[in-house]
Amino acid sequence: MTGLERLNKKALATDQGAIRTMFDKAAKMENVISMGIGEPSQDTNLAICRAAADALMSGKTHYAPNAGVLALRRAISRNGFILKDFFDPEGEIMVTNGGMGAFALIMQVILEPGDEVLIQDPQYLNFEKTVSYCGGVAVPVPTTFESGFCMDAEEIRRRYVKGKTKMLIINSPNNPTGEVAPEEKLREIAKAAVELDLLVLTDEVYGTLLYDGAKPFSIASFPGMKERTIVVNSFSKAYAMTGWRLGYVAGPKGIIDRMTKVQEYFNSCINTPAQYGAVYALEHPEFAEEIRVQFEERRKIALDGFSSVKGIVTNVPKGAFYLFPSIKGTGMSSTEFCNRLLDEARVVCVPGNAFGECGEGHMRVSYSGKCEDIIRAIERIRNFCEKI
Ligand SMILES: Cc1ncc(COP(=O)(O)O)c(C=O)c1O
């Protein structure tokens, strides 16, 4: 008996994502530079660590409320979202196990089997996976390099099916493209969402990482949106706190109430001392700004480097820490290019088609690593592209 025969169909259908597959392959090789992972290379600011350690040492070692420590929910309301003091810390906000923990709870309380969720293509892989694991059907909304990989309201309307389409997911700044949706485009999308009576999940985890004068903006601020929008955010990228597993979510009271109840049965609550560290982080937004400035420098190095690589044309996105260059000029598919790049040049990038059909012909480049690694990786990519 292997145990597999006892598993349900959903578990059996779950496979490893393309990003992990690439890492597993790279882990068996030597001298590899990664531009694959979406994780800040910086350690968490020591003052934030100290605040969590102080909480631990002063007896904050017990269960926290299911929705999160109230001091943290208040700090989140004040300073954690693009929209300041917009959500009520007592009822409209809860703390989750990372942004990913927020998706899991959202999908569990909202989706009925067969409900359709519109998601842009290319998209962050976990959206599709959590939707389908919770019984929903992810419906891709195609986007193009030329339009900055931003969804068009008309494409959303075209894919809407009355009685089936329940939710729309927005992610700006975006993973995997780094693009920031223009305010005008978001206004059109908001109009369509109100007209079609859709719930909107807006993932704003990269909301502090903006460059070239891009302004933070949330779709939740348009008329008629607050009552239908669930905003997901996280400490992972903004404060370099990926390992802390701290995210948060705001939305209509009825939805947050049910998510809090489901949290009780699945996780009980989120790590208590970590939540006190997070309060300190939100009281010091200058830490997030420091990180943004560091990424701004890395972005410049990456864009300068790619501007002269044969066969590669990159987008110039204004957010997050990703580029999504076209590799069509090399004549290879995304998978072939990224596999050969790893085998022959020892650089990890993620094939664009891992994020959806519209990602074919592209690769995701993460410039979240150290400056010297970005420089060395692009030099290797340049040599590889000269050779092929
Ligand atoms: C778009 C997007 N949303 C959410 C997350 C989740 O981050 P975490 O669970 O670490 O908060 C990620 C992580 O890569 C992401 O890229």
Image: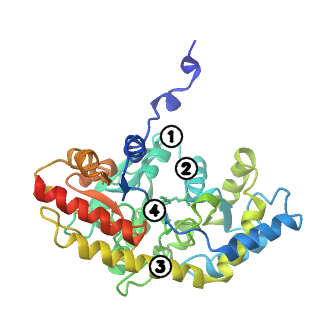
- Which amino acid does the dot numbered 4 rest on? Asp
**Residue located beneath label 1 in the image:** 133
**Residue located beneath label 2 in the image:** 107
Quote the CA–CA distance across marks 1 and 2.
Answer: 9 Å
- Which amino acid does the dot numbered 2 rest on? Met
Q: Can the viewer see residue 88?
A: no
Sequence order check, earlier mark of 1 and 2: 2
Quote the CA–CA distance across marks 3 and 1.
Answer: 34 Å
Q: Secondary structure at mark 1?
A: helix
Quote the CA–CA distance across marks 2 and 3.
Answer: 30 Å
Q: Is residue 148 left or right of residue 219?
A: left
- Which amino acid does the dot numbered 1 rest on? Tyr
Sequence order check, earlier mark of 4 and 3: 4
Residue at the front extreme, as displayed: 31
Quick check: marks 2 and 3 in contact, CB under 8 Å?
no
Q: Secondary structure at mark 3?
A: helix
Quote the CA–CA distance across marks 4 and 3.
Answer: 36 Å
Sequence order check, earlier mark of 3 and 1: 1
Sequence order check, earlier mark of 1 and 4: 1
The circle drawn on residue 292 is: 3
Q: Please tell me which residue is depicted at 14% across the width and 48% down the height of the picture.
A: 332
**Residue located beneath label 4 in the image:** 197
- Residue 293 percent across, percent down from the top left: 46, 82
